[in-house]
Image (cartoon, rainbow, N blue to C red):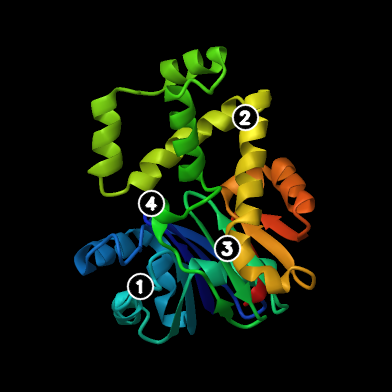
Amino acid sequence: MKLIADAGSTKTDWRLINSEGLVIGTFESGGLNPIVFDDDTLKMNLARSGDLFDFVDNISEVHLYGAGTDEPGAQARLHSILTSVFDKAVVSINDDLLAAARATAGKEPGLVVILGTGSNSGYYDGTRIRKSIGHFGYVLMDDASGNWFGRQLIRDYFFEKMPAQLRRKFKQKYNLDEHYLKTHIYRSEQPNTFLAQYSLFMHENYDERYIKKLLLRGFTDFMEGEMHAYRQYKKDLPVHFSGSIAYFYQKELREAVKNTGWKLGKIIRKPLDYLVNFH
């Protein structure tokens, strides 16, 4: 049997596949981001996978995809922990960008973009990610992500660029105290996640013209900015998208892709179920 996992900081989703390629088990454990957690915490979070351990002796392959696995030393740490549990299996660990590529493009070349809490992009040759600009987080990059849109909403509120009726709703919904914001943005361990929570305001007020314009601006800037690094592939390859921001706001995303002259590929929310088909 094969075990496929999509690991994040908050939780890890698992799918167990039998020899016929059918999903026979769905499990959830704690987060397995090796950048966020030390080894003891990783082991404790893995242990929270419940009935999954009943199948350990029958699992021959483990394919885990996750955030933070591309950092130096992180993959080796996680590999050691997983092989100590799944001792009869061949363990493979890859990052979330390859997960998005395999889930959307399969074995065909294409450009792949993650638009979730953060954002990332790369050129996929059908086997591996051959080019990526790198992921430098919310300070330098993360354009068109949940935390980017959250940051724009906060800025527009204080700059009074947000319409008056929306400013009132925004103030009622969120704590906009200056000390509170500064503490969480500059001193918390996950400021990107903190900022991303403000982007939920777009979903709740999606019909507002201001929200639609903000979404279109964010996606357009991304396609003209970050995707410029892949301009040599523009005429030949589609751009695939994965992540909640891409999925829930795909109307504006589709418009931005079309207006900037790129070829649109697939748009999915989560790669895990598509990875089951890939493997």
Residue at image coords 52%, 29%: 201
* Camera-nearest residue between 116 and 121: 121
Instruction: Tell me the number on the disc at residue 7.
Output: none
Q: Nearer the viewer, mark 1 or mark 2?
A: 2
Q: CA distance from mark 1 to mark 3?
A: 21 Å
The crowding category of the residue bearing disc 2, from other C-alpha atoms within 10 Å (few below 14, some 14 to 19, many at least 20), is: some
Disc 4, SS: helix
Mark 1 or mark 3: which comes first in sequence?
1
Q: Nearer the viewer, mark 1 or mark 3?
A: 1
The three-letter amino acid code for the residue at tag 4 is Val
The three-letter amino acid code for the residue at tag 2 is Ile
Mark 2 or mark 3: which comes first in sequence?
2
Q: Quadrant of the N terminus?
A: bottom right
Q: CA distance from mark 4 to mark 2?
A: 23 Å
Mark 1 or mark 2: which comes first in sequence?
1
* Marks 4 & 1, CB-CB < 8 Å contact: no
The three-letter amino acid code for the residue at tag 1 is Glu
Numbered-mark total: 4
Instruction: Tell me the number on the disc at residue 71.
Output: 1
Mark 4 or mark 2: which comes first in sequence?
4
Instruction: Tell me the number on the disc at residue 211.
Output: 2
Q: Position of residue 168 (x, y in %)?
A: 48, 13
Q: CA distance from mark 4 to mark 1?
A: 18 Å
Would residue 98 appear left or right of 27 to someone viewing this image? Answer: right
Instruction: Residue 171: name its quadrant.
Output: top left
Q: Nearer the viewer, mark 2 or mark 3?
A: 2
